[in-house]
Image (spheres, rainbow, N blue to C red):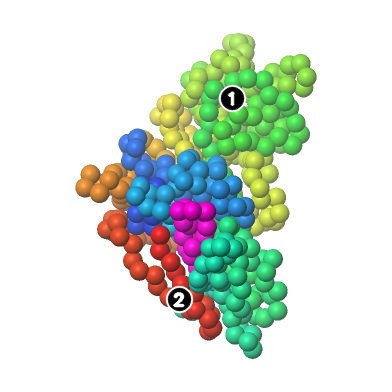
Amino acid sequence: MSEPSPRRATIGELRLVAFKSHVGTVLPLAPVTLVQGVSGSGKSNLLDALAALSGLAGGAELAEALAPVRGGLRGCVPHGRQGFRLGCTVETARSGTVSLEVAVRTDGEPRIVAERITGALPGTPPRVLLATGEEDRARRRINAVWHSDGRQGDIRAPLSAGSLLAAQLPLRIAGATAGEQRVLTAVEDLLTALREVFPVDPVPALMRGWVPAGDDARLRGSAANLSAVLARIQGECRIRYGKLLRSVRTGSPHPVRELGVLRGDGARVRAALWEAEGAVTGAESMSNGLLRYLAFATVLLTGPGVLQMSSADVPQVDRLLTVLAEDLDAGLAEGQVAELLRLAGEVVRHGHARLLATLRDGAAGAAPEALVLNCRRDPRTGYSVLEPSSAPAPNSVSAPARTPTRIPPPPPPPAPPPVPVQAGGGGRGEWAHD
């Protein structure tokens, strides 16, 4: 399975230092990554972690940025702790390898207490591009230092602790030196990759009714407006519509002649299938599994322009969608799961998207080219543990040069002491712990 164009920033690794049920978890990300495990094992928390970083990358205040994540801001915190820590690594053509680490405290007013960005160009050691120091809790600010290469050394300034510092930098850095330009480029690539994340967890109960049609309809994560999006695809792109129809025919338990929408009063539409014998089945009569299947297939076959995402400012050539599919196999027959995974493989080979999905135990066998991981709870600590599949497929894809031979187990609960770091060649920052 080929990697996307190197021009596009790609999330290669996710680190859950302390997030929900995970402590010390490293998740490598391949073009198609499948995490299987029983209910309650913590596999969905992996999707939440990437969704949380994506929300923070949007630049909103912490509570607003994390509101779409299950449990919101407070729900991100592991039991017995006062904050959470996440990190990720992004592979880029312009900036090399860019890594982000961020720590959030929730005791008192929520705030960023530490953030660090490092960058490593090919053949060179990593350089700290951004680091943080002391907090000013009264003003809800945190001291930051970023790489400059200027005569005065690195730049120091207080930034708001109420939102991700990386999202603030483009408006704070002048770009007057080569060092500042490097920081801006790395931050731009990092934010682009994180903002191109789309979590989807279709809710059939919300998909059955009439919805307003619209030429600019964008699919929500719940797929509640799927009917409007189908009407848009049918009218705008016959190629996409044809692929979607073929996929529905493959995944349907009965012969399907046509896929489309019924039109009601007030420019409202409802999804429908025309069966081979002439019967018409509207969304109100479709099974939960068929509706979920239709929603997942639609996401995989459409681009960010048809999904409800806040990344319209990203040039199309730089866009690489990362789909987070919750319980991909819930309510679906084995053949439907196999068809969705086949479809995901086709989309990945064309460099249009990547997929991180959760499944029940054993369902990942339909994707021989995927990176398959198992998630379970450690009965001793209660933490979630992520492990390579016990029987990896011979053609499984690894995340680019970053897949560990063994995903490390959670460390003991006490966090390490703060570690001082140096940004560029200048001032010092402090990597605080939660």
- Main SS of residues in magenta: strand
186 is higher (above) or lower (below) than 358:
below
Q: Which residue is mark 2?
A: 421
- What residue is shown at x 54% (from left), y 83% (from top)? 426
- When asked about the image quadrant of residue 274, the answer is top right
Q: Secondary structure at mark 1?
A: loop
On screen, residue 125 versus residue 321, left or right, reads left
Q: Where does residue 81 sit, x and y in percent of width and height? A: 37, 52
Q: Nearer the viewer, residue 282 or 131?
A: 131
Q: Nearer the viewer, residue 257 or 140?
A: 140
Residue type beneath disc 1: Met
Pointer 2 or 1: first along the chain: 1
Q: Please tell me whether residue 275 belongs to the stretch shown in magenta.
A: no
397 is higher (above) or lower (below) than 186:
above
- What residue is shown at x 61% (from left), y 78% (from top)? 155
- Looking at this rendering, what residue extends furthest in the bottom direction? 151
Q: Which residues are magenta?
A: 99-119
Q: Which residue is mark 1?
A: 207
On screen, residue 191 versus residue 337, left or right, reads right
Q: Where does residue 353 sit, x and y in percent of width and height? A: 56, 48
Name the disc covering residue 413, or none. Answer: none
Q: Please tell me whether residue 103 belongs to the stretch shown in magenta.
A: yes
- When asked about the image quadrant of residue 409, the answer is bottom left
Residue type beneath disc 2: Val
Mark 2 or 1: in front is 2
- The C terminus is located in which quarter? bottom left
Q: Residues within 10 Å of mark 1 (few under 14, many from 20)?
A: many
Q: Where does residue 178 sit, x and y in percent of width and height? A: 65, 80
Q: Where does residue 310 sit, x and y in percent of width and height? A: 66, 48
Q: Nearer the viewer, residue 317 or 415?
A: 415
- When asked about the image quadrant of residue 332, the answer is top left
